Amino acid sequence: MGIRIAITGINSYFASTLLPILEANTEVEEIIGIDVTPWKGGFKKVRFHKEDIRSENIGRLLKGVDVVFHLAFIVGEIHDKKKTLDININGSKNIFTACAENNVKKVIYTSSMTVYGAYQDNALGFTEESPLSQNSDSYYNSSKIQVEGFVADFFKKYPEITLTILRVGLLCGPHIKNMFSALWSKKISALPMGRNSHNQLIHEKDLGDAFHLALKKDIPGIFNVCADDALATRWMFKKAKVKIILVPATPLKFILNILFMLRLQNVSQGWVSMSEHTIYGLSDKFKDATGWSPEYTSKQAFNDFLTARKRDAKDTLKQSFLTKLYTTPWALKQALRGLNASFFLIEKTPWLKNVIPMTNPNKNNMTYLPNSKKIIDQRPKTLAIDETVGEAGSEIIPRRILDDMIELNTTHIIMDTCICRTGFNCENFTNEIGCLFMGETAKKLPPELGRIVTKEMAHEHVSKACDIGLVPMVGKVNVDNLGFLTPDTKKLLSVCFCCHCCCMMGYYKHDSEHQKKLFKPVEGIQIHTTENCIGCGECVETCIFDNIINKEGITTHLDHCTGCGRCEATCQHGGVEIILNNPDYIEDVKERLGSFIKAPR
């Protein structure tokens, strides 16, 4: 039996530094991932549980776990401070109590260098024996100090459990995407006048290595883990090309509180207090205990962030408008609602739906690729000895279509986020898996919204999306030309990774007969209800086109089924069956879509 590890905050930036190491570690058998946000995917060993760390189910989830990494903590500020403290403090207590009840062998808790406090008389070179200082207006500093006090006392009663507390510097690197990267990405920002603070960072790679060493070695106690240098706050903002306005600290805090209350700013005065004075620590104790040494300086970590955020080109004025719209959730939500209303009016107007480009059957053709390994393969074939016809395979057969299209195209753009899931704040799937676009027109999409990738990266992106249960939809989608204000030259192939709760493809449901002209199932795919159906109706909720009905406990697929296969994936009783009986399905789909999209040169 290998090691079973649990990670709270599995979707966090901190966890992202550790997961690749655990995935590659042959001694790690399973990772129990716990988070309140939808699983981001990408790691085969993870068994994800969408759960609040305050939940009474935590004890059950930690049963049989050897090591717990407690990384869940509210860092980005929210308006409900009572909830913030409840999660940070009571949630942490709940985790530690469950660890003791389940006889976990080791607990690794990430604290922060901020526990030393930000004050003018700070020593340069805090050690683990230095006193902790509370900044009363900082929920983060106060919470970290309080949790540290609790956990140290709590585990004194359980000496058989190894407790390691890591006081971590400001995590930074190429994958940072949080409140700090947002501050460094603004055009203009304010800093407190008369303050010359410095920031001690730690690179993603160095933190991942530190986590791994804490896992491999038994090192009870508290340890500072940071780079060996620090960067001036003003230098960092200037290096990031942010124009700085200096404002006296007291008025700056007042202004920030007002803007935060009005939801025009994402931080309040507590973060100003934490940035007023330098907090610089020494990591000698951790180095001596583990042999760890940071490979990266703070400057290298910050420069890696700056390099990673560079795009292939800058947005034009038009593209800047689109970027702002598609990255502002409230505005995006209203835009999506307006689009849905437009589809309704168009679909209900007989002559209009065949004229407007985004609903014209001559300009749109879309196909879902069922994300299931249970598709029954009934294609004619030559049988080997002991082989039978009509058995489910171990691969996702329709994915071959998309794999072929990725290889055929030379331009591949992956969007940073899913526009639909961002706009509707999806609770079921992560918004960090965006659409994949291919073709010459893809080069005209806003550079700030996506990135050019290799074929290998495109394949990996598709795999990650499918692994967490998203369904690829591939085809010619004119509304994408409209949404990105690009002319329709038949050179844009869209791949949307759809969820049942947010996907705008559901806007086409207002006229079932017209919908059949736009959405074509994979040639040879058949989906139907089996005798195992118990009539529970769960599959009905997953169909964004209302193509499944449940009457008196009998579930039926209507004749305008798009073949997405969500119903089969949802059913826990084997009540839905997908059959593929066309040996030429790949070429048939490619030929059909090829009549709508010009082949790449």
Image (cartoon, rainbow, N blue to C red):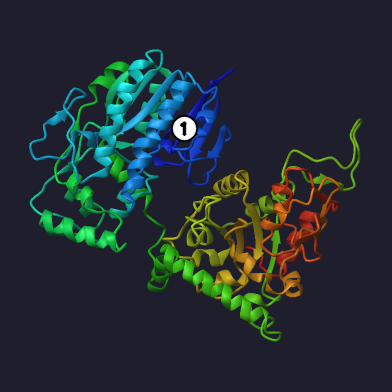
Q: Residue furthest bottom?
A: 351
Looking at the image, residue 280 sits to the left or right of residue 497; the answer is: left
Quarter of the figure that contains the N terminus: top right
| Image label count | 1
Residue 359, located in which quarter of the rendered image? Answer: bottom right
Where is residue 188? Give x, y as percent.
23, 62
Where is residue 132? Give x, y as percent.
18, 31
Where is residue 479? Give x, y as percent.
58, 71
Looking at the image, residue 235 sits to the left or right of residue 360; the answer is: left
Disc 1 marks a residue whose amino acid type is Ile
Q: Residue furthest top?
A: 160
- State the residue at coordinates (32%, 62%): 263
Quarter of the figure that contains the C terminus: bottom right
* Pointer 1 residue: 7
Looking at the image, residue 208 sits to the left or right of residue 548; the answer is: left
Residue 108, above or below 559:
above
Note whether residue 565 is visible.
Answer: no
